[in-house]
Amino acid sequence: MTQHRGAGDRAPLSRQRILRAAVALADETGAEAFSMRRLAQELGVVPMALYKHVAGKDELLDGMVDVVVGDIAPPEPGAPWKTAVRQQILAARDVLLRHRWAASVIESRPGPTPAVLGHLDSVIGTFRDGGLSADLTHHAMHALGTRLLGFSPELFATGGAEPSPGEAGEAAAKAAAAAYPRVAEIAAAAAHDAGSTVGGGCDDLFEFVFALDLLLDGIERLHGQGWSSSRTP
């Protein structure tokens, strides 16, 4: 980030200015290295000045989430419900990709923030205005899970140890493939994306959209059948 400005040319401190600066700092440092002291330095104020606008780090994190989620673009007016939900979720993913720390912070909060509730309320409204029952909408929201906010749990953990180079690494890879042949088969069949969140594995966007479309197609089919949870065995 740029050097903070001197006292003579600083904009007045406000809650919104603090939150926007906090989001920018988290974009630069990640959530783990983020601190109130570092934020105060970036803003050119003493840390206590922040507490006139936010009660503490928890309130600051909630506000940061609301800034990020508040940037999710709404769907096109008049779009069919399935198209509109897809647009809302992919817009959320686009925002979360610009703020890669945000997914873990959203999951860490004890409850949904106002902007998160507003986004969920909008998606629910899209389903209901499209004619889906409250019952089916309830279960659809559960099925979509965190995809509603643009991210999803990955099958394989990230950040694991890099494979050993040379013959030792090749031998280890062959041993793993022999022990888990079906996993190796599927891994070899995957399209690869160097920037993938699954560690040099699958194409993240393709996998996200594939699962999203699979779920939306299923929800559409159940809606067409007049599905009700009370009639499910």
Image (cartoon, grey):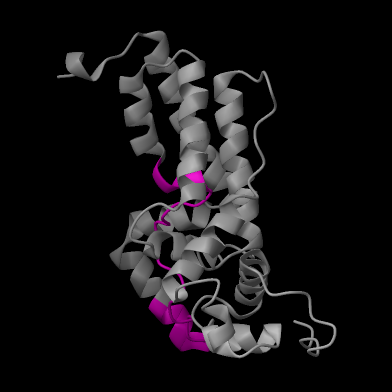
Q: Nearer the viewer, residue 209 or 54?
A: 54
Residue 49: x percent and y percent?
A: 58, 83
- In the rendered image, the vertical position of residue 163 relative to residue 154, given as above or below: below
Report which quarter residue 106 is drawn in: bottom left
Q: Nearer the viewer, residue 74 or 166?
A: 74
Residue farthest along the top direction in this orientation: 225
Residue 203: tell me if it is visible: no
Which quadrant does the N terminus fall into? bottom right
The residue drawn where x is 68% and y is 85% is 42
The residue drawn where x is 76% and y is 86% is 4
Q: Magenta region: which residues?
A: 145-172
Is residue 146 toward the left or the right of residue 80 in the image? left
Residue 45: x percent and y percent?
A: 66, 88
- In the rendered image, the vertical position of residue 218 relative to residue 149, given as above or below: above
The residue drawn where x is 45% and y is 51% is 152
Which quadrant does the C terminus fall into? top left
Report which quarter residue 24 is drawn in: bottom right
Residue 41: tell me if it is visible: yes
Residue 23: x percent and y percent?
A: 62, 69
Report which quarter residue 25 is drawn in: bottom right
Is residue 5 toward the left or the right of residue 27 in the image? right
The residue drawn where x is 80% and y is 90% is 6
Q: Is residue 166 magenta?
A: yes
